[in-house]
Image: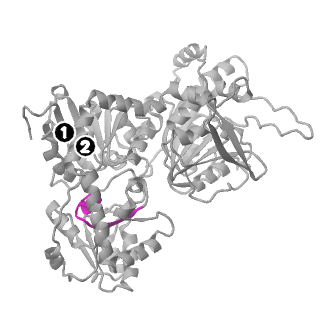
C-alpha cells in the first residue's frame, strides 16, 4: 500500500503482518495505519521485497512479535537497522521456531543474549549450559543492538529494554483503542446463552502463560454458586494448553463454549457479549494485550494479573489479581462479586472507556509515532534533559556529593567510581510502591536509589550478628538521607525479609568474600525477590587482563589477596578478605544454577584510572589465539528471577 500527499511530511516504510494473519500485531497495524497515513507518507510492506532500498525512506518501522509471522521482518531489521516496535520484550519463540543453524545456531543466539558477543569470539568451555533455555530467556539483545530506536507500550517494557543496555532512543507509546458501544446480544444467541446468564470471556491465542486451564478450575468453583454462568474461550490453543481435554475432565461441556480464531468484527461482538473479560498473564514479558485494550474501549470490565505493565493501569478501570499462591482463591471471589453485580461491571467499564478516550485513542497514538519519528528541536531538548540523570558526569558528581573528602569512604569511592556509576546505570527504574535491597550497603550510591532511580523503600544490609541499625548521611548541600541496615551473615543466615518482598536486589562486591556456602546467599536472594524481580551482581573478574599480567609476572592472581590484620579484644572484627574470585562464565553458571535467567553479562573497570599494561596483555592473548573479550576488572551481571533454584550444590563450585 502506498500513501502520498503534499500535507504529509516524512517518508515511512512500515513492515508488519496484516489481517487475516493470526497475530495480534496484524490487528494492531490494521487500526494504526489509517491514522498514521494521515500524518506521514506511508508505505506498508506485508512481505519483504527482494531489493528493498531503505535509503528511499526517512524512517523504517519494523513491527516485531514473538511468533513465525515476523520471521522475515526480523531478518530485515537485522540487515537494515531502523525503528523496532516491540509488542513484548521477548522473541525466544520466534528465534527458536526459525531454526536457523540448528542447535548450533540456537546456542549462538543464547551466547549473544548473555555476553553480547559472537560465539566464535569467546572460549566455548563453560559459557552457558547448552540446550533449550527457559521461555523467559528473551533473545532480544541482538535485535536491540541492530536497532536505531525502539517503540514500546509501557514503562515496564521500556525498563526491560534498558536492562539489555539499549543506548538508542525509546518511545513509550500506549497501545491504541477505540471507544465504541456494540450490542453483543445476537452473539449471545449464537452461543445459546440467555441475556440474563453471567458470561465470562477469554480471548486470543491461549499460550501457557495465559493460564486458561487454571481459569477452568476457577470457573468450576464459580458454578457451585452461579450455576447459570457460562465461559467463552475464543481463540486457538497452544500445543501445551489441552483445553479440550480439561473441559471434558472437569465435566464443563454444558457451561463452556469453545471457538477458534475470530475475525476482528466477530471478536469485538463476542467481547461485547460478555459481562467480564478474563485476561491473566504470568509470566509477563512487557506485553500490552490488544484484547485488553479492545475490551476497555468497548466498556467491558477486564480482570487481569497485577504484574508488569498492568501495574501502570488505574485501579478504577479494571480488576487486578495478585500473582501468588492465593491467585485462584482471589480470582473466584472477584468473579463472583462482578458476575453478581452488573451495575458494578458497567461502572468499571465506563471508567475504562473514559481512560481510553483520554490516553489511548488511535489518533493520539499515531501522533505520538509521528512526533517520535520526526521530533521537533524542543522535544529533543526535553528528551536530553530527562536522560541527564544517567549521564556519567552527572552521576560522578552526585555520588561524590555524598562522601566526605579524605575519609576511608572517599578513598573507596575513588577506587570504585566507574563501578558505582555503572551499577546505577544498570539498576532498573523503580516506583514509589517498589522496594530495593542493597547488600553490602556503604551508603554511597544508596541515596541515588530513591532520588535518581525512584524506589519508594530502600533497605540496606551488612555482615553482622543480627538486628539492625539506622544510619544517616548528609551530602555537601546539607541534604540528609536515612536508611535502615540489617545485620546478618548472607551465606549462613536466612535473610530477615518475607518471600517475594523486593523488586530489585543489588549484590555488589559480596560474592568474592564468601568462604562457606555462596549458594545459600543466591537462594535467599531468589526467595526475597518478587516474581520476575531483578538481581544486579558485581564481583572481581579472575580472568581479567590485570590478573593475566600478575600471573605472568609471577604474582598472586587474585584482585585482592591479603589477610585482614588480627584484631584485639574490644575491637570490631575486620572485614573478611576475598576468598574466591570468579570468571564471567562461572557467574553465568552461578545465576543459572540459582534459578535466574541471565539478561546480560559484561565487564568494566572499577576506577577511572586505565590499566597501563592492557594493550601489551591483549597483544599476548591475541598472539596465543585467546579471547580478549570480557577482560576488564569487574564483572557486571543482570539476572531476572525465573524458576525455583535448580542446583543447590553445583559440582563446579562444591566438592562432593
Q: Earlier in the sequence, mark 1 or mark 2?
A: 1
The answer to whether residue 530 is visible is yes
Residue 4: say if magenta: no
Q: Which residues are magenta?
A: 292-305
Q: Is residue 469 above or below residue 342?
A: above
Compared with 615, 488 (above or below) is: below
Quarter location, residue 538? top right
Q: Is residue 27 above or below residue 545?
A: below
Q: Residue at x 20, y 49 (%)?
A: 362
Quarter of the rendering containing residue 610: top right
The image position of residue 135, as x and y in percent, is: 41, 52
The residue drawn where x is 37% and y is 56% is 313
Give the alpha-carbon distance from disc 1 to disc 2, as whole Å.
Answer: 8 Å
Which of these two is toward me, 85 or 618? Answer: 85
Q: Secondary structure at mark 2?
A: strand
Residue 229 is situated, as x and y percent measured from the top left of the image, at 30, 81
Q: Residue furthest right?
A: 569
**Which image quarter: residue 407?**
top right
Cβ–Cβ below 8 Å for labels 1 and 2? yes
Secondary structure type for disc 1: strand
Q: Residue at x 65, y 51 (%)?
A: 649
Residue under label 1 = 14
Residue nearer the viewer, 3 or 246: 3
Q: Which residue is mark 2?
A: 63
Residue 554 to residue 17: above or below? above
Left or right for 294, reference 307: left
Foreground residue among 341 and 113: 341
The residue carrying pointer 2 sits among few (fewer than 14), some (14 to 19) or many (20 or more) residues within 10 Å by Cα, namely many
| Image quarter of the N terminus | top left
Classify residue 231 as left or right of residue 125: left
Amino acid at each position: 500500500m502506498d500513501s502520498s500527499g503534499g500535507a504529509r511530511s516524512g517518508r515511512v516504510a512500515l513492515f508488519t503482518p496484516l489481517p487475516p494473519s493470526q497475530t495480534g500485531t496484524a490487528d494492531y497495524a490494521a487500526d494504526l495505519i489509517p491514522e498514521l497515513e494521515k500524518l506521514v507518507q506511508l508505505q506498508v510492506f506485508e512481505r519483504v521485497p527482494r531489493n528493498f532500498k531503505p535509503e528511499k525512506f526517512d524512517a523504517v518501522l519494523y513491527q516485531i512479535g514473538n511468533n513465525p509471522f515476523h520471521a522475515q521482518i526480523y531478518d530485515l531489521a537485522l540487515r537494515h537497522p531502523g525503528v523496532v516496535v516491540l509488542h513484548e520484550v521477548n522473541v525466544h519463540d520466534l528465534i527458536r521456531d526459525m531454526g536457523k543453524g540448528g542447535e548450533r545456531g540456537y546456542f549462538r543466539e543464547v551466547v549473544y543474549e548473555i555476553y553480547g558477543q559472537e560465539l566464535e569470539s569467546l572460549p566455548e568451555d563453560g559459557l552457558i549450559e547448552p540446550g533449550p533455555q527457559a521461555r523467559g530467556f528473551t533473545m532480544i539483545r541482538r535485535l536491540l543492538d541492530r536497532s536505531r530506536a525502539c517503540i514500546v507500550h509501557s514503562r515496564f517494557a521500556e525498563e526491560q529494554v534498558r536492562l539489555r543496555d539499549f543506548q538508542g532512543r525509546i518511545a513509550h507509546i500506549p497501545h491504541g483503542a477505540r471507544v465504541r458501544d456494540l450490542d453483543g446480544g445476537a452473539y449471545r444467541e449464537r452461543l445459546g446463552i440467555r441475556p440474563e446468564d453471567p458470561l465470562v470471556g477469554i480471548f486470543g491465542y491461549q499460550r501457557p502463560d495465559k493460564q486458561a486451564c487454571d481459569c477452568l478450575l476457577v470457573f468450576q468453583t464459580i458454578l457451585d454458586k452461579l450455576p447459570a454462568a457460562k465461559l467463552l474461550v475464543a481463540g486457538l490453543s497452544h500445543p501445551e494448553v489441552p483445553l479440550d481435554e480439561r473441559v471434558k475432565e472437569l465435566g464443563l461441556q454444558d457451561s463452556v463454549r469453545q471457538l477458534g480464531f475470530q475475525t476482528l468484527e466477530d471478536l469485538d461482538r463476542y467481547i461485547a457479549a460478555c459481562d467480564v473479560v478474563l485476561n491473566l498473564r504470568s509470566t509477563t514479558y512487557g506485553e500490552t494485550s490488544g484484547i485488553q485494550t479492545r475490551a476497555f474501549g468497548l466498556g467491558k470490565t477486564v480482570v487481569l494479573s497485577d504484574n508488569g505493565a498492568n501495574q501502570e493501569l488505574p485501579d478504577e478501570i479494571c480488576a487486578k489479581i495478585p500473582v501468588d499462591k492465593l491467585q485462584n482463591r482471589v480470582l473466584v471471589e472477584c468473579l463472583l462479586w462482578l458476575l453478581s453485580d452488573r451495575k458494578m461491571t458497567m461502572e468499571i467499564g465506563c471508567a475504562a472507556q473514559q481512560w481510553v478516550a483520554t490516553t489511548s485513542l488511535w489518533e493520539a497514538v499515531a501522533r505520538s509515532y509521528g512526533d517520535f519519528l520526526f521530533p521537533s528541536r524542543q522535544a529533543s531538548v526535553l528528551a536530553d534533559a530527562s536522560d541527564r540523570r544517567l549521564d556519567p558526569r552527572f552521576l560522578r558528581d552526585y555520588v561524590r556529593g555524598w562522601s566526605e573528602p579524605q575519609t576511608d569512604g572517599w578513598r573507596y569511592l575513588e577506587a570504585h567510581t566507574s563501578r558505582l556509576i555503572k551499577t546505577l546505570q544498570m539498576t532498573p527504574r523503580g516506583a514509589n510502591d517498589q522496594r530495593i535491597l542493597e547488600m553490602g550497603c556503604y551508603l554511597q550510591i544508596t541515596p541515588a536509589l530513591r532520588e535518581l532511580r525512584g524506589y519508594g523503600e530502600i533497605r540496606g544490609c551488612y555482615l553482622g550478628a543480627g538486628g539492625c541499625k539506622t544510619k544517616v548521611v548528609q551530602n555537601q548541600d546539607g541534604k540528609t538521607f536515612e536508611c535502615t541496615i540489617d545485620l546478618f551473615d548472607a551465606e549462613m543466615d536466612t535473610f530477615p525479609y518475607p518471600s517475594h518482598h523486593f523488586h530489585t536486589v543489588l549484590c555488589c562486591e559480596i560474592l568474592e568474600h564468601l568462604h562457606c556456602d555462596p549458594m545459600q546467599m543466591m537462594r535467599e536472594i531468589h526467595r526475597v525477590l518478587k516474581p520476575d524481580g531483578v538481581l544486579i551482581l558485581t564481583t572481581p573478574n579472575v580472568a581479567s587482563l590485570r590478573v593475566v599480567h600478575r600471573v605472568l609476572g609471577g604474582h598472586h592472581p587474585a584482585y585482592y589477596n591479603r589477610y585482614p590484620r588480627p584484631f584485639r579484644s574490644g575491637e570490631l572484627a575486620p572485614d573478611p578478605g576475598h576468598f574466591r574470585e570468579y570468571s564471567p562464565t562461572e557467574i553465568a553458571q552461578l545465576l543459572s544454577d540459582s534459578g535466574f535467567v541471565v539478561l546480560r553479562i559484561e565487564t568494566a573497570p572499577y576506577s577511572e584510572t586505565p590499566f597501563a599494561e592492557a594493550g601489551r596483555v591483549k597483544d599476548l592473548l591475541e598472539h596465543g589465539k585467546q579471547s580478549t573479550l570480557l577482560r576488564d576488572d569487574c564483572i557486571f551481571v543482570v539476572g531476572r528471577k525465573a524458576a525455583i533454584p535448580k542446583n543447590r550444590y553445583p559440582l563446579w563450585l562444591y566438592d562432593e
